[in-house]
Image (cartoon, grey):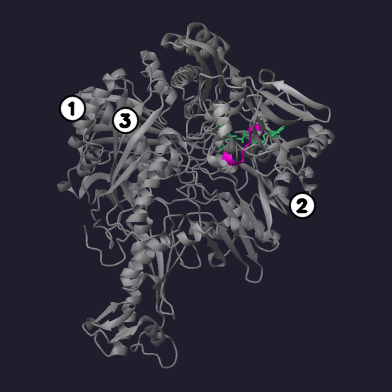
Amino acid sequence: MREITGYVGKPLLRREDRRLLHGEGQFVGDIVLPKMVHCAFVRSQVPHARIKGVDFAAARRAPGFVTALSGRDIRNVVTPIAGMQVSIPKGWRDRFHYHIDVPAQQILADDKVNYVGEAYAVVVAEDRYKAEDAAELVEPDFEVLEPVVDVDRALKPGSPVLHAEVGSNVISVMSTKKGDGAAALARAKHRIKRRYYHHRYAAMPMECRAVVADYDIRTDSLTVWSSTQVVHWIRKEIGSILGMPEERVRVIAPDVGGGFGGKGHVYPEDVLVPYLARTLRRPIKYVEDRFEHLVNSAHARDNFHDLEIGFDDDGKIVCIVDDFVIDSGAYSPVGATCAANSIAHLLGPYDIQNYEAKGTLVATNKTSNAPYRGAGRPEAAFAMERAIDIAANSIGLDPILMRLRNMVPPERLPFSVGLPYRDGVPITYDSGDYPQALRRAVEELGGLENFRRRQAEGLAAGRYLGIGVGCYVEGTGVGPFEGASVRLDPSGKIMVAVGANNHGQGHETVFAQVAADVWNVPIDQVVVTTADTAAVPMGYGTIASRSTVTAGSAVVHASAKVKDKVLAIAANMLETPTADLEFRDGAVGVKGVPDLKVTLKEIWWASRPGWDHKRPPDMEAGLEANHYYEPPTVTWSYATNAAIVELDPDTGRVTVEKFVAVHDAGILVNPLLADGQVRGGLVQGIGAALYEEIAYDENGQILMGTLADYLLPTADDTPPITVIHQEIPSPSNPLGVKGLGEGGAIAPPCAITNAVSDALRPFKAEFNATPVRWEQVRKVFAEAGVSTPRGRG
Amino acid sequence: MKPPQFDYHAPGSIEEAVTLLGSYGGDAKVLAGGQSLIPVLNFRLARPGVLIDINRIGALSFIREADGGVAIGATTRQRMIEGSDIVGRRAPLLADATRLIGHLPIRTRGTIGGSLSHADPAAEDPAVVTALDATMVALSKRGERRVPASGFFRSLLTTALEPDELLVRIEFPPTPAGTGTAFVEISRRHGDFALAGVAAQVTLAGDRASEVRLAACGAGPGPIRLAAAEKIVRDGGASAASIEAAAAAAAAGVEPTSDVHASAAYRRDLVRAMTRRALERAVARAAGGTR
Ligand SMILES: Cc1cc2nc3c(=O)[nH]c(=O)nc-3n(C[C@H](O)[C@H](O)[C@H](O)COP(=O)(O)OP(=O)(O)OC[C@H]3O[C@@H](n4cnc5c(N)ncnc54)[C@H](O)[C@@H]3O)c2cc1C
């Protein structure tokens, strides 16, 4: 164990807990402003139609009606958000073959609706009840078009095309390679190709999205509260679309009940609601309900990987060739990111010389696909980790041993992979011990040999047990940058603001821990603000497992700038050279002389502009600094997940007996919160493996309209989970941290499908699609004529 | 997800409620625990002009022994039934089943009368009253009407209750000595509506099964009495072979449909497994005298 001297490394309870547990959290839904009106969106009930007209006549007569707009009413007034909301750096463009032509979504559908749930009109009324009453009376005139309901259909010649401006349903293709995949495949002793399908599901936060906007005519400014992960992105879009200086747009994310990526980009409502506030000169509120969330907030995954693995008799992998297709849904606001991530992460912790990967994004008449916790990694890990199990079994090698034979050993780190990351920088796995993570995970399950013995004994008694693992690496702390602002307050408190957006992670606590150590002050002397554009001039947001790495580093650097001035002023006050001074307990003091010190409060007063200051000559007033941390590239987290499952032959029920994750996120600023992050992700991953699914019927109708259909795992359905942190520091940033927000969700689908397939090895059954359906498991037993021994049901 | 506008009445007595129902008839909906009705309203799947909230009518909430069996008032919470000594002794199958309904907060509000009136095909209470031949007692201005379970469930979410009728109580017949019960179901998650469930009550007399009652939920448009399976055990006894044959007959006798959670074929297959397990457990309890 490292010795913990400061706050970093301590499992502190969250500062946020008090208000949240007392029911005093402030979510967007809690905001009530004088004269506030409410809106309801009118959403398409068909997947594909041309809009010939929208009739508001009956709606206008409804009680409490204020106004209504169709797409046509705002055409050229409220222009769309860019189709692809993230930029692609040159370094990546130079090393990839790619074509990206992601269409922009209208703020309100104007010409066509492209999925069930797409808004084509908005109704504003005195309350949400009346808004819904009036919205029901809106009469669309639709010419229904043939829907494109799956990628196979979308790619066939003669398929309807969603976006005429793109010209085909292929909105992006990208590929890269290292070595020579095809030639290596031809030479490989064994090769196995399968289609691996990672299904469609969604982030599904407890709090749906919500926006409140208030326009102030005196200052021509907008204040917008949004349940989002990216306040600065929203400010930028509002500024440019509504033609306002960004300084006059303040976007705040108050308490946010989860995001997980689903709130990680700008949605049309984020722009339209502020537009309405400015037009109506009244505050306005939109709180998405669960049905709207299911049909309109981004979905995720939905990938087919046609992956071929080549390997030799010893199980050494010689090449991977993967051709995958993402069902993007109608738009893909951040979608190409997932494809790039899949390509960059597919090789995982293994040393594989030859690799080719190609990803294709295909538009269909479904809800848009965007990153969700893992963002391209769970689907890549799923294809890769299933392929390894199938390959190992084909040559009679234990899949766990096959992994150990292919993993990059710790002594070869830092390890250059030979591929570019999404930030354009060549990938270097920077620190860690992959085989150790795998060994510890399996040991935690009782050890491989023990398990194989238990499995055999079970089988003899009609019990079907299986073990499965999932290993991955994850680039975290990605750029382009994150901002922090650090200021000494006249009270002596350290005011810290970050561009990161807290939505449950405990940022107010974690960044206070970092700042308290940097300043050597009691943690109560640090005040943290997150997710407020007024507090940090430029920020990026909390997506992609990056905030502790990037915002944490920004806090360190911004603090350093202020501390330099503070030290110089203290030196002047104490008439002691700075080299003899130290920060201690909220003051600057002379080393070795406990009584000789000036407090931070005294230093602030000594620094202020005007008469009688005690700054050194030529030093400007102001103890404040911004810093924009631009990470050189990502730092690499990784984990092994391992599960034991038991299957019930009569029903196919899958019971996860035990689940283990050995995870490395470098230095844990707060082990308690880190543990919570990993566990939360694991439960979401278990949900993906066994419960959560968004299905459409053959007509393009979404089948999940409530949480009675979309099954989130609850505490009752969560197996016993052990999380082991392998704290190997990152060499890539001042804190030694690696990101951990997403990791948990990456590997449960592959660990569980591997375990289920392992239990069904006597029948040679392979589960190469998620979710694992009990019905499918039952089918294997039924076909084999196996039922549960009496008395065990 | 806001309900359309409605008028609201909260009568304090059964008479008042029945009068209101008589005057509004089809335009009114009774509000009991609201666990099914409120979502229906929020989705605007029903648009009653009037809600008649019967939660304040104390006389509708009771559990009492009656004629050797038990009578339960319509607004008795599922949570009260679950913990009731009387139910445990007089209608143990109902106690078994009630524990499986939703989650504790749902049972704390949900009522037996609401569940029966709502008639969800996957719900437990309808299967229990079907297996036990309980009697639903309905009241309207026209008087009291007793409807046997076999005639109460008409089709998906539809019962024999007339728009002006209030379900006031449910009467369960006595449970013979030497009886064991079991309600066995399978659901995707803890607390979900069952993919398939089976209620079993078996009375043993020596090595004969003198009375066998079986009903399934989640396997058709409403609860289904598994008469062919009952007969197999009644005629053939509680042997493993007879239970296996009964389970096959049960599976053959249901009419499940496919939905996002399970195909019809899988549900049918589950009915077989649930029937076998329910019978095994009920027989073991009957033999062990633990019900
Ligand atoms: C998350 C969740 C999970 C659930 N899981 C299950 C489950 O596993 N199994 C299960 O069986 N149920 C389940 N339920 C439903 C729950 O048990 C309900 O309580 C029950 O279905 C209805 O009872 P209620 O008292 O809430 O009725 P309400 O919702 O108030 O009413 C239901 C219907 O019955 C009518 N009605 C009610 N009382 C009377 C009366 N006395 N006379 C005439 N008409 C009447 C109403 O007008 C309405 O049409 C679940 C509900 C939820 C929300």
In which chain is the residue bearing label 1?
A: A
Q: Nearer the viewer, mark 1 or mark 3?
A: 3
Q: Closest to the observer: A223 or B16?
A: B16
Specify whether residue A191 is painted magenta: no
Chain of the residue that carries numbered disc 3 in the rendered image: A
Query: Whole-percent x and y of residue A221?
Result: 61, 66
- Residue pointed to by mark 2: A64
Q: Quadrant of residue B120?
A: top right
> What number is the disc on residue B40?
none
Q: Earlier in the sequence, mark 1 or mark 3?
A: 1
Packing grade of label 1 (10 A; few <14, some 14-19, many >=20) is: some
Q: Main secondary structure of the magenta part?
A: helix
Callout 2 amino acid:
Gly
Image region (quadrant) for ligand 1: top right
**Stretch of the chain drawn in magenta:** B106-113
Residue toward you, B17 or B45 = B17
Q: Is residue A633 left or right of residue A58?
A: left
Q: Quadrant of residue A470?
A: top left
Location of residue A657 in the rendering, given as x and y in whole percent from the top left corner = 34, 34
Residue that carries the numbered disc 3 in the rendered image:
A755
- Residue A66: image x %, image y %? 74, 53
| Magenta-drawn stretch contains B111 | yes
Q: Earlier in the sequence, mark 1 or mark 2?
A: 2
Q: Which residue is mark 1?
A: A312
Q: With respect to residue A470, does A697 lie above or below?
A: above
